[in-house]
Image (cartoon, grey):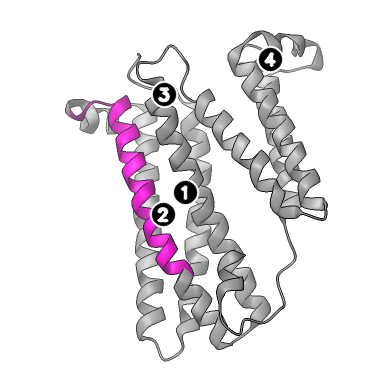
Amino acid sequence: GRLGRSVPGAPPAAPRAWAPYAAAAGFVAALGLASVVATGNLVPHSLSEIDVGGLYESRDGKLALLEVNAFLAAGLCALSRRPATQVWPLAAVVVAEALRAHPATEHGALLGSGLTLAHLTCAALWAGGLLHVLRTLRTWGPAEASAALLGLYARVAAVLLAAITATGVWSSLRRMPPGTVLEQLTDTAYGRTLLAKVLLVAAVAGLALWARIRLRRAPDPLAACVPARAEVVALGLVVVVSGLLTALPVPIRW
């Protein structure tokens, strides 16, 4: 949104916000996560198996509750007169998830949480930002401002891709020492899923490069929207694989 407002001569029209629906989806997912944590990290088969009070007694339970409340707050902020305030509860979700993914007993847990925090933030800005830019371009139509907005986003996305790559590689090497990476990528479920994620991210990077080339060299800069739309779909697959990755046991035990 800020990039769009910075474009000279940009049309005043803006796409309808999806933030309330996204917050609702996050709230439901966080409730599901909390229910799993409340049953000892097992999928509950009935409401009687869920120990809600037990969530307050464990670190993971408190973090899961924090995510539930933060998504609820984000939804209320999105419906308020100041929807931009939803950035704060959403930031709390990212911080909570970064802490939850790295237990306090892990060696160098603070470093791991910091890497995950940066990785999640950049990934959210990349995927969500691209989706919002494409929706804005559809609202604006074939105007010079549309090409300018796409160009601004392309520069931001290049920085985000570099940060995502650096934090992702670093996090992986912390979990799989360099001498065992090749073996674990093919012999463990975690490694194979990680390999699939790497290949998807490589495909996303290729689509982003294709869109950037079209933006610079094509007679119509908005031709870059075609690979950009494919990039959004590929990023959605990356999110799905990332979710699966968090549910698999890490091959290296701390």
Magenta part of the chain: 153-178
Residue linked to disc 3: 110
Asked whether the beta carbons under mark 4 and mark 3 sit within 8 Å of each other, the answer is: no
For the residues marked 1 and 3, what is the alpha-carbon distance in whole angstroms? 18 Å
Residue 94, placed above or below residue 143: above
Residue 160 included in the magenta stretch of the image: yes
Q: Nearer the viewer, mark 4 or mark 1?
A: 1
Residue linked to disc 1: 122
Dot 2 crowding, Cα within 10 Å, few <14, some 14–19, many 20+ = many
For the residues marked 2 and 1, what is the alpha-carbon distance in whole angstroms? 6 Å
* SS assignment at label 2: helix
Of the numbered discs 4 and 1, the one sitting upstream in the chain is: 4
For the residues marked 2 and 3, what is the alpha-carbon distance in whole angstroms? 22 Å
Percent of width and height locating residue 149? 52, 75
Q: Nearer the viewer, mark 2 or mark 3?
A: 3
User: At 35% from the left edge and 45% from the top edge, which residue is drawn?
Assistant: 198
Dot 4 crowding, Cα within 10 Å, few <14, some 14–19, many 20+ = many
* SS assignment at label 3: helix
Percent of width and height locating residue 31? 72, 29
**Residue 38 numbered mark, or none:** 4
Asked whether the beta carbons under mark 2 and mark 1 sit within 8 Å of each other, the answer is: yes
Q: Amino acid at mark 1?
A: Cys
Of the numbered discs 4 and 3, the one sitting upstream in the chain is: 4
**Residue 160 numbered mark, or none:** 2
Q: Nearer the viewer, mark 1 or mark 3?
A: 3
